[in-house]
Amino acid sequence: MSERVSVPQGAVSWLDLWTSDVEGSRRFYSDLFGWEAQEASEEFGGYWMFSRAGVPIAGGMGDMGDLKADNTWKIYVATDDINDMVTKGEGLGAQFFMPPMPVADMGVQTVFTDATGAALGAWQPLSFKGFTTMDEHGSPCWFELNARDFDAAVNFYTTVFGVGTKVMADSDDFRYTTLMVDDHEVAGVLDASGRLGEGVPSHWVVYWQVDDIVSATQRVTELGGAVLEGPVDSPFGQIATVADPSGAVFKLRSSPTE
């Protein structure tokens, strides 16, 4: 288990789901992970939070008027100075969908695509820091960028968010670097240039921890989702790629057994 009081710059602080089926998604994730779907907020256009063990773990949003949901999970990276982050990001080719926008007294956010075209958000916290639990059943455990341009991706995050790096593998077959904050691994960057299908953009993938991956993948299908790959063994545990009933893709991971 990992509990955190604050989220350092460069670490993922929040996650939300943009779904075309609000009620279906609220049921699916509540049943899969044991979450509780909170009431939607009229003030914030129907945005709602999922809670786990009484504390926020993720958010959700449906269609926004004529802007239809794309059924994806989005990460938000913490920043101490969102305006500086925007300036640096624009200098490296990021495309911002909106200027930094206050969210009540909770923080300031923006949403953008990075230098490789991957969509994500940034969050400068005020009263709301983000999720606090990792590596427990139903909580996030890893975040991974599948990048079409590996070098541009690594340069973007080290420059814009000031993170360090650790090279995990560096061959033509497998190239992977982790992003580091205060000697802690906070995310990974995979060279996916030869792995992504035609027309598939760079994108972030969220991993959720589960106690029993076989039971969890079975539950995904029982609830109307799909198992796309796995479970497969890895040095980091068993991993499966799944999708919810609306097509939002994410990964499940169970810890290695002793």
Image (tube, helix red, strand yellow):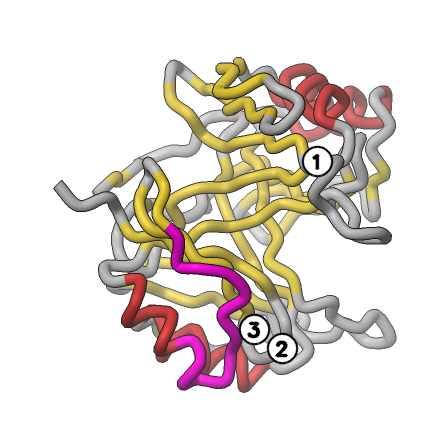
Q: Total number of numbered labels?
A: 3
- What secondary structure is found at the residue carrying circle 1? strand
Tell me the residue at 53%/78% (across/down): 25
Range of residues picked out in magenta:
220-232
Q: Earlier in the sequence, mark 3 or mark 1?
A: 3
- Quadrant position of residue 185: top left
Residue under the image location 57 percent in, 43 percent down: 107
Q: Which residue is mark 3?
A: 41
Q: Amino acid at mark 1?
A: Ala
- Quadrant in which the C terminus is drawn: top left
In the rendered view, does 212 fall on the left or right side of 140?
Answer: left
Distance from Cα at disc 3 to Cα at disc 1: 34 Å
* Residue located at (50% from left, 38% from top): 12
Instruction: Please tell me which of labels 2 and 3 falls first in the chain.
Output: 3
> For mark 2, what is the residue?
246
Q: Quadrant of the N terminus?
A: top left
Left or right: 94 in relation to 103 = right
Q: Residues within 10 Å of mark 3 (few under 14, many from 20)?
A: few
* Mark in front: 2 vs 3: 2
Picture coordinates of residue 149, whole percent (x, y): 77, 29
- Is 42 drawn above or below residue 229 in the view shown? below
Could you say which is closer to the camera, residue 2 or residue 200? 200
Q: CA distance from mark 1 to mark 2?
A: 24 Å
- Give the amino acid type for the residue marked by disc 3 in the picture: Ser
Mark 2 and mark 3: Cα distance apart in space: 22 Å
Residue furthest to the front = 173
- Name the amino acid, label 2: Ser
Task: Give the image location of residue 20, x and y in percent.
Answer: 68, 78
Q: Between tags 1 and 2, which lies in front?
A: 1
Can the viewer see residue 144? yes
Q: Which residue is mark 1?
A: 147
